[in-house]
């Protein structure tokens, strides 16, 4: 998460494929292949210049930054995985949902909730974010730390900073800023930059924060002097809740309401133009023929008509509030947001 943590192009690509019902496995890189060991970044002048410039901007020790980047490696798998998904893949909400709202995640989520009930309650008290939403995000992202990625973050970010693949919009500046943030985080936490593992895009820990988001939104929730999103559930919970609060989460506001989309094609198209951005009042929904449930009709703020495709079947619709939109700031996908909500709700129901 998204913030542009989690919202790398490849993460959006993964969720697009998942929405189509395509089964995806998280790639891992336990060790480089022999031929990859020769592709180190240390000899490159442009990389060492970046190390010096980053050190000057962030008050890092230049020798330390150079030494860290000299150990970075180009990883071909990272360059492949950042590319867009195949064109023409139809989205399918039912298939996407089944990947996340399923027994393994529900059982693991119940255990995570039980083990960390105190921290979840404290986060809700402080930021207003319900436990079910925090638990849903961590479950969708990594199954509570089971799938945090097997790439060295240093390698992934260096590959995308200095050898971003051709064939798509160049994201080199973004990944260089993330690499710089990663070095700063490692310095502040006393970490060896070659140690942390994460996704092919450089996302880290149970909630899969990109380094800049970790610096900006990461919370030392248990006040032990460290922000640890890899092994410390208290910090994970506090950081996720803090992130959502910073992106507009409103206490006690529902995430969405039931709605029947307008029958008229033009009315439906007009309501869908803003996509997931809440833009219409309940009265404006009614004027366009959208039938909200009772709670939705009483909603005082703006709403978004959110459409979720179901392959060849009829789409599903919800009326998203500003809290639904806040979840999409973690990952720019309505499919992702609703999966988070429904996983968290399934776990909450099982706890009764």
Image (cartoon, helix red, strand yellow):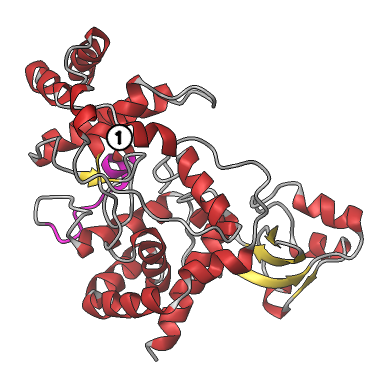
Few, some or many residues within 10 Å of mark 1 (<14, 14–19, 20+): many
Q: Quadrant of residue 210?
A: top left
Please tell me which residue is depicted at 19% across the width and 32% down the height of the picture: 34
Q: Nearer the viewer, residue 141 or 185?
A: 141
Q: Nearer the viewer, residue 268 or 34?
A: 34
Please tell me which residue is depicted at 90% across the width and 53% down the height of the picture: 266
Please tell me which residue is depicted at 35% across the width and 69% down the height of the picture: 124
- Position above or below: 219 against 222: above
Location of mark 1 (residue):
156
| Residue 216 within the segment the image draws in magenta | yes
Count how many numbered circles sit on residues in the image. 1
Across and down, in percent, residue 304 comes to: 69, 57
In magenta, the rendered stretch is 213-223
The residue lying furthest to the top in this view is: 45
Across and down, in percent, residue 104 comes to: 37, 76
Disc 1 element: helix
């Amino acid at each position: 998460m998204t913030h542009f943590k989690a919202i790398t192009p490849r993460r959006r690509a993964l969720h697009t494929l998942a929405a189509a019902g395509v089964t995806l496995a998280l790639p891992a890189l336990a060790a480089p292949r022999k031929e990859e060991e020769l592709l180190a970044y240390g000899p490159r002048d442009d990389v060492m210049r970046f190390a010096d410039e980053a050190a000057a901007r962030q008050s890092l020790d230049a020798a330390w930054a150079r030494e860290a980047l000299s150990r970075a490696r180009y990883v071909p798998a990272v360059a492949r995985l950042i590319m867009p998904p195949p064109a023409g893949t139809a989205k399918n909400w039912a298939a996407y949902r089944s990947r996340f709202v399923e027994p393994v995640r529900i059982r693991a989520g119940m255990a995570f909730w039980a083990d960390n009930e105190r921290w979840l309650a404290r986060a809700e008290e402080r930021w207003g974010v319900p436990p079910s939403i925090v638990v849903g995000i961590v479950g969708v992202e990594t199954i509570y730390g089971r799938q945090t990625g097997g790439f060295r973050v240093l390698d992934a970010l260096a590959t995308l900073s200095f050898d971003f693949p051709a064939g798509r919009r160049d994201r080199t500046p973004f990944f260089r800023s993330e690499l710089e943030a990663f070095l700063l985080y490692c310095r502040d936490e006393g970490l060896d930059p070659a140690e942390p593992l994460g996704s092919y895009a450089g996302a880290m820990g149970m909630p899969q924060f990109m380094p800049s988001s970790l610096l900006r939104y990461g919370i030392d929730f248990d006040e032990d002097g460290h922000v640890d999103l890899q092994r410390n559930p208290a910090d994970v919970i506090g950081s996720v809740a803090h992130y959502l609060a910073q992106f507009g989460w409103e206490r006690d506001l529902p995430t969405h309401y039931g709605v029947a989309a307008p029958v008229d094609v033009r009315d439906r198209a007009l309501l869908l133009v803003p996509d997931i951005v809440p833009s219409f009042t309940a009265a404006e929904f009614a004027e366009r023929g959208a039938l909200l449930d009772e709670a939705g009709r009483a909603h005082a703020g703006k709403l978004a008509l959110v459409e979720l495709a179901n392959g060849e079947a009829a789409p599903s619709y919800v009326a998203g509030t500003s809290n639904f939109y806040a979840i999409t700031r973690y990952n720019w996908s309505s499919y992702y947001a609703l999966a988070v909500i429904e996983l968290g709700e399934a776990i909450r129901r099982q706890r009764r």
